[in-house]
Amino acid sequence: MTQTSESKNLLLLKPRGFCAGVVRAIDIVRIALDAFGPPIYVRKEIVHNKYVVEELKEKGAIFVDDVEEVPNGERVIYSAHGVAPSVREASKLRLLRVIDATCPLVTKVHVEAIRFARDGYSLILIGHLNHDEIVGTLGEAPAVTQVVSSAAQVKDIVVPDPNRVAYLTQTTLSLDEATDIIEALKEKFPNIRGPHAQDICYATENRQQAVKNVAEKVDLLLVVGSPNSSNSNRLVEVARNLGTTNSHLIDTCEDINHDWLNGVATVALTAGASAPEILVQQAIEFLGKRGFNNVQEVEVMPEHVRFALPAEIVAAIAAAPAPAAAE
């Protein structure tokens, strides 16, 4: 787009930021801290966002890499990304009081993995091998599961029975990337089975669609999200694949490189599903001071998804004393 002397454009993509699974997970930690008091242990980052994790640390949450680090009998919260059965077993051995913040859409993938394995299928898990979500899902049926992260890897897959193969996907993948891998799997295994409904979550899909809606109309696209956030990284990839090479992931507005803004008339701003809105607002302020004052919100579709809290948290809320009446 051509630079003009007029106020420059800032397109705020919607939906952006927290999804229902992230809201639920963060609420679980906050309510647990209020109801039971610290320390509350959390296995892994509750969601993949530095700001969120640091905020919860300040409130008394203690983040650990393994349940072995949690003292016997203490409360531990599993992150939104889910855990393998071995983690659940280790928690039982330590008599830990578990609160499970696994996103229900991730739980769906775990259930599908168990079902396919039980029915005698070789399972192809599409995703990033070391991502917390993949590690947890792989743990449900490691003996029959292989992880692939690209269409090129499909040719190397070997299974006992090519007619009994199934696939599942990580919930935070690029839709386009996943489609390419699934097509390669279908070509290699014509009788392959998949989930009843796609595993890539609604929030991932909606945020990617919002990026696709504007990518070819903007000079710069910024995605608020931490470097270890899979869905945030995928948003950058989606934009770059559509030709918007000036697309970048930023943890905070301080990561914005001034060179990115040279000659730019229109910026699109979005946020990954684990990035809080406060970081978006800080980016808006940063860009506003640099002339991007013509702010427009571009909504692709509304989101009204909500997930129920786990029983332990519901019980804690019910047991909390009622606030004192104002005099």
Image: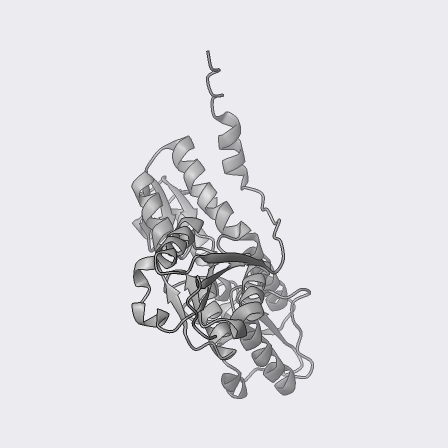
Residue 189 seen: yes
Q: For this view, does 64 lie left or right of residue 243?
A: left
Quick check: 225 above or below 307?
Answer: below
Q: Nearer the viewer, residue 283 or 290?
A: 290
Q: Nearer the viewer, residue 144 or 153?
A: 153
Residue 245: x and y in percent read 43, 78
Residue 44 seen: no
Can you name the residue that lies furthest to the top here? Answer: 327
Can you name the residue that lies furthest to the front here? Answer: 5
Q: Write down the quadrant of residue 224 in the picture.
A: bottom left
Residue 59: x and y in percent read 33, 39
Q: Write down the quadrant of residue 114 in the picture.
A: bottom right
| Residue at x 57%, y 71% (from the top left corner) | 175
Residue 236: x and y in percent read 45, 70
Residue 198: x and y in percent read 63, 66
| Residue at x 41%, y 51% (from the top left corner) | 281
Q: Nearer the viewer, residue 209 or 230?
A: 209
